[in-house]
Structure formats: structure tokens, C-alpha cells
Image (cartoon, helix red, strand yellow):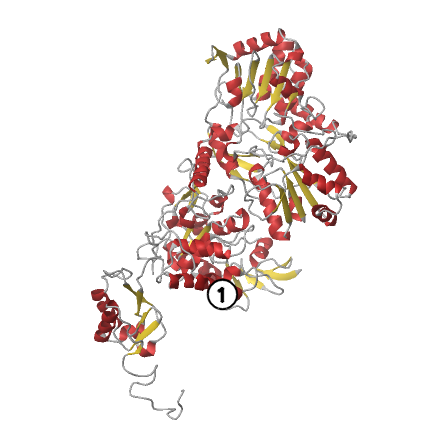
Amino acid sequence: MIKLKVNDIDIEVEEGTTVLQACEKAGFEIPRFCYHEKLSIAGNCRMCLVEMEKSPKPVASCAMPASDGMNIKTNTQLVEKARKGVMEFLLANHPLDCPVCDQGGECDLQDQSMFYGIDKSRYKENKRYVPDKYMGPLIKTQMTRCIHCTRCIRFATEIGGVTELGAIGRGEDMQITTYLEKSMESELSANVIDLCPVGALTSKPYVFEARPWELKKTETIDVMDAVGSNIRVDTYGWEVKRVLPRINEDINAEWISDKTRYSCDGLKNQRLDVPYLKENNQFKKISWKEANKIIVEKINNVNSEKIAGLTGDLTNMETCFIAKEFFNKTIKSKYLDCRNDNYYINNSSRENYIFNSKINGIEETDLLILIGTNPRYEATILNLRIRQSYLKNKTEIYSMGDIGDQTYPYTILNNSTDTIKEILENENSEIAVKIKNSSKPMIVIGQSVLKLKSGKYIFESLKNYLIKNNKINDQWKALNVLSNNASTVGSYDLDLLSGNGEENPTINNIKENKFEIIFLFGQDEFSFKKKNEFVVYIGSHGDKGAELANIILPGASFTEQESHFTNLEGRIQKSYSASYPPGDAKEDWEIINNLSELLKRKKLFNNKNELVDSMLNYLKLNIKEENTVDINFKFISEKIIINPMDYYFSNVIARASKTMAECRNEKTKIKRTGTEG
Amino acid sequence: MSIKKISKEQPDKFEFDKKNNEVAKKIIQNYPVGKQQSAVMGLLYLAQKQNDNWIPLSAMKYIAKFLDMPYIKVYEVATFYSMYNLSPVGKYFIQICTTTPCMIRGAYKLVDVCKRKISNKENNLSDDRKCSWVEVECLGACINAPMMQINDDYFEDLDENKCEKIIDQILSGKKPEPGSYKGRKNSEPENNRKTLINLKNA
């Protein structure tokens, strides 16, 4: 521990901290532009100057390591004068266009100039002009505002893993740009907007939309992937204007993916606001009363075994639970499933479908094997942790099959199930030896694997193998399943499964046209050849599911209802409503509750609190007990093919978003011309 | 100094010739294994020499791949240093020092000659596209001011007439003699050496 004095207050800090961090610990805020906790230290803005005893000049506190016996002063006249001088230089070339700048109100330069700025400028020369740069459909640039803090460059290089931003020229003529103004090819690119302390990099889709003080801020959870990033949703009236990250060191640190940030304009397009009925292949607006009446009539005239239901990829746990109760108690059908295909799931234990090593655990691992997953697209934020792990520990990373650029190097293994068999049966194979020697290995299984014919074999035998080798114990659990959808783990926790987990009788029977009524609770990733089924779609967006439907009941999206989501590591998180459902749309649970009331003259739950309580109670009581699975799983030699994923179009909200469509076009354009090399 | 202009006319392809390829590999060997990126400056200079004194974008890409580093990093280096030319400068690239000592001794007269003989503006090619000139900061030959550098050679102790002669020679394809144009050796005193007379190599 190092002992030092800050403004005559004695403090102790750990070795390796900087003077700036020590000052913060002592309770003195230091102004800064270039310094950022998560990035490397640059020390080029000079705003954090402090006075240090025995130093003739003020020192940049962000780049000065704290050492024993230092005596730091942060509130002397010298410090103030130095900072004022720095600020004057920064403002010399900064255009004073705050009234038309999107950063206004949340701008570091603006805030700090309130303390250190001078009321008039002594700079009589012409201000520097810098041409604006093209950085893709998400980032709007106004480079005359740039103060050369290089946060964006450091983010792209260190965190994003794409060295695409750089500073060209020098001195006054330094300019931040991408190579020949190409758009940034990263799923995390928009984080540079948050990092930019001035208005040089601002959000293109959000340009001139609102001022920060006009927005209502709601802290909630993201549903674009299974990671469950913590986000803040800013709304202006009904409309969701933007999404920003919230700090949660265990999940997303302080970054979010571009899809999380920019699919929010999909929340106002393609929305279902009134119930619709399909007549002569055309949708006709009807009232809730009529819609409910038609559905009730249908259900009453059909054998309960002829009714099936599917929940979707964005469905919250409340809706899942009430759908389950609806099927169990009201309709009395057992054909309700959350899977849209034959994914293998051993629901007997929670460890069989969650990311056991935890997102934080990735940074501890020394060996990582990816089987049938492309984490860059399936869980962008999680992939960022894998990169950190590679940078920190030089983690060895293997992948079955070539999965493209992942922002870190990995060794490609043969993408056949034979590779896994080799590991399991040949003790001396390279990977088997590596697993044995590793203290904290991680094996990540993607959902694409569980869909394979030998999915059961791969999962169960790998699990047995790891237990046998003591890689799954109380301290460390090496086997991880990477779910793709926000609802997956929550639905498994609530046992929304039909059949024994190996087959999916709901899906299989739907495909064989055995049902008469099918409920789609926000399920849009599934299609089948329709015959005479009566399809009821409950959801928020007019997409694939609504296309299939005979009757559409308008529901709410994730920002419009209070609900719970469980992320891929099994962490249950509450999301809050930032807005309300449009038009006549209702919250999903309410729709199902009303239907139940009409069918049985009794509501399933009296209010939402009752629903949430009984759901949480179910989760508490439903402690799953490990039961043995029969060991006769069949091995089939086959290729492990990863489900192709259209990153920017992976769910209904993203598909309705214009920004995502632009990103997708940008990406495919790059591929077509082949100018990248 | 303003930011360097990237030429609009770019060759499609650039590759080191056989000899330079060897040289490049030798430069890389000066650095530890895995730190080959440190050789970027040497390689850029090599590319510049091979390509008539300027570096096209294709050469930057080629070097980036050669050293396994991102394009932007090479681009950053090339735009940072003033001695890398990013647009054509002609086969004969004339740099006239206009820092204080040279300026006092009449460097702007040399600039006038260049304006007359080569092109009206600096960095513009002459009519036959063989030659261009540029004002630069101190080239470290203050004692022989005013001076100019043509490709690798220094031409020192110049005045208007001498400069005109040199440029005429160059434009007509001859190779002028480098060194002092006052007849002195290196930077010895103007009216011969006064000290260390007995030492030959002093």
C-alpha cells in the first residue's frame, strides 16, 4: 500500500494506482478529457493537472503513478491557473456552436468550461477547419469540434479489437479518421459516441431529436441477445429516442452493442395497435371484444389436445409463466414450447442450459473451446470479454470450424463431431491433454450444436467427461451453453417445454398439421406450411408471426411492460416500462388473462403483482434435482454447422428498424466490392 | 504545414522489386521477432525511393500486409512525417531550406528561381512532370546557407545565378555536381583554413 497526501488528507492506495485515482479516492474530482478508466492512459489533454510538492511544474495526474510520500494539491491557485490555460488552448480551435450541437447538455467540455473557462477569447486568428469524416451509418462526425483526446482510437484498438480509427497528420492538423473514410466494421462501434467528451462524434440516427433534459430516463434490461446488458432507455412522450449503456461490471461493463443501441427505432415501426382478423386473405380491424369472442368460440369447439402454443425469442418471463398457466389450467393442453426447433435440452438441472462460468469468469480462464458458436454475432458483449481474456492472459482459444474474424486469434479445429469424439476417447489427443492440464478450462456450446442429431451425445458425453476429469466442481464449472435469445434461459427455468427435452412434439406436430388452433406468443422465428389451422398471434410487431395469423392481438414490446428476464448466465433481472403500448395494444399478460376469464369465468391472476409473486414462487420452489440420463446416446458423424445469423436482422424489433437496415446494407456492400484487400 | 494531400491519381499496384525485397527483409531483421512493425518507417522510405520519391496508397497497403499491421497504422505514420511524400513530386525533388540562417542569406531568391523555372506553387510538378520543389525547415547545413537538397544531394552556398544553373542542368537531364558552390571543402572557412592546417583529415 502507498501512503500519500491529497490536500492534506492522508490516504492509502494500492500500488499501481495513478495520482488521479488517488485524488478521486480522497474525494476530490479531477477534470479530465482523455483519461478513461477502461482505456489505456494517453495523458494528452492536460486537463487533469495537479500540483505536486517538489515538482516545479504541475503534473498530469492521470499519467503519474502514485508513490509513497507524495503531497498533492488540487485546489491551489497554480492548479486553477494551469487548468484555465489548458482550457483556453482547447477552446482556441473549438467552434462555439453548442446551441446546434447534439452533445449540448451532456458535454464534458461544456461542463468543465463552466469552472475553468474564460468569458472571452484572446484568440484572434481564424479557427481551424477540419473536414467531416464518414464513419458509417451510426456515427455522425463534426470534426472541427474534436479536441484530440484519442479516446475513440483507444477504444477501437483495445476494446473493440478493430484497429480502424487513427490520427493522421500532426500538431494542429491532426485529424481522427478511419482508413480512407471507410465505415467502422465493429458491432461495438457506437460506443465511441459515449466516449467522445465533445460533440465530434455524435449519434447519426439521433441527430437533432431531443435535448437530454427533455427525456425521461428509465433504467432497464436489453433483450437483443441473451447477455441482458443493462441499459437506460430515454423516451420523449411515447417514443423511445435512444438507448444508452448502464454500468454493470458483471455483465456489460459500460459498453453495449450497436444492435442494442440502435434497434430502438424499430419500436415505432410496424407496430400492431389494434386487433386484426384475417378475412379473405386481408386483415380487417376489429375490436377486442369481437376478437376475444372469436377466439373463445374456436377454443370451446376444439379438443384441448388440438391446441398448441409457442413462445418467442423476446418473450418476458411473466408472459411465459401466464402462458404456461393458461395452457395448464385453462386450456389443459400440454403442447406449449419455447423452442422453435428440435433443440436438445436436459431440463433436469439448471447447469445444463446456462453459462456456468459466468461472464466475469471468462477473464479467468486459460483455455477456451468454442463449439458451434460465433460469439461475435451471437453475444457481442460476451465476445468482448473473450478478447479481454486473450489480451490479459493470452488465453488459448479454439473453435470448431472457421467462424470468421472474432477480434482475437483462435485455432481452427475440424468442424466435425468426430473431433469431439477424438477428445473424449483418445486421452492423448492434443485438446484432451490441454483440457486436463488447464486449471480453468471453458467449453462453450452454441445452440446450433444442440439442434444437431448428435446434440445429445455431444452435450451429455462432454458433461460426463468434464465431471470425470474434475473440471466441473463447486469452484469452477467448465461447461457453458451460449443461448442466443433473451427469453431462452427464463423459459427453461419456467419449464416451458413439451416432451422429454430431446424431441419437440409441439413443433413436430405443427409441421405435420396436427393442430387446429396455434397460439404464437411473440414467436416470429418459425414458419410452417399452413393448412386449416387457426393461428392466434399475440405480439408487438407485424412480422412473420403476424403473417401466419388468422387473428392478431396487439401486445407490448420490452420497453412498454414491467417484466423479468433471465440472462444466459442465469441472472434474473427486472426490466421497467419506459413507455406504454401504442393504440389499443395491451400488455401481453393482460391479453392472456382476459382470454382466460372469458373461457373459464375466472381470471388466472387478479393483478400483475400476483402474477409476479407466483412466478417468483414457482422459480423458488422448482429447485431442479439432478437425475441421470440414459447413457445410450447415439453418435452420428456430422458437420457442426453454425446457424447463419443475420446480425442486424435477428429479431422483430431489429427487422423493423431503419437504422439496422442501413447497417446491414453497409455491411453487404463492403462484402460485394471486395475493396478491403 | 498543413495536412498532406493524398494524390487522386493512384497506381493500382505496388510491390517491392527483387532488390528492395531483400533490403526490406534485412530491415525487419533489425528488430526482435514479433516486433516487425517497428520496420514501418524504413519500409516506407524504401517504397518512396522505389516509386519516384512518393508513396502511393497501394504501397501503404502493401507494407501493412508485409508487416502484418492495420492499414490505418501505416497511414498514420506516413501522414505524420513530413519527408514522406504522398503525391507525385517528380523524379527530381527539390527542397529549399527557408529557416532563419538560410532566409537571411537569401533563400527566398532561390524560391523565386524555382517559381520561375519549375512551377508557380510549391508541390506542383513542372510542365514535363520531372521536377517539383518545396520549402522546408532546417536541413542542418546552416553554415553553408543558403542551400537546397535535390533527392539525396546537398547543393550549398548558392545564389540566384548558381541556383538557376543547377535547375537548368536538371531540367535538361544532366546531373549537377553536389556540394559547395563557393569552392570550399565541406564547411571550412570561406577564405581557406586558418587552423589545424597540418592535419589532412580535419
Q: Position of residue A121 (x, y in %)?
A: 35, 55
The residue under the point 51% across, 48% down is A162
The amino acid type found where label 1 is placed reads: Ile
Is residue A149 among what the camera can see? Answer: no
The residue under the point 44% across, 53% down is B61
Quarter holding residue B180: bottom left
Q: Where B154 sits versus A560, above or below?
A: below
Q: How many labels does the image show?
A: 1
Along the viewing direction, whichever of A332 and A306 lies nearer the viewer: A306
Q: Position of residue A225 (x, y in %)?
A: 57, 34
Q: Where is residue A56 in the image (x, y as percent from the top left)?
A: 50, 69
Along the viewing direction, whichever of A550 and A45 lies nearer the viewer: A550
Q: Where A183 sits versus B53, above or below?
A: above
Q: Position of residue A17 (x, y in %)?
A: 60, 57
The residue under the point 24% across, 67% down is B171
Q: Mark 1 lies on which chain?
A: B
Q: Residue lying furthest bottom in this view?
A: B198
Residue under numbered circle 1: B27
State which quarter of the image contains the N terminus of chain A: bottom right
Left or right of A82? Residue A419 is: right
Q: Where A89 sits versus B164, above or below?
A: above
SS at circle 1: helix
Quarter holding residue A626: top right
Left or right of B168? Residue B34 is: right
Along the viewing direction, whichever of B15 and A571 lies nearer the viewer: B15
Quarter holding residue B17: bottom left
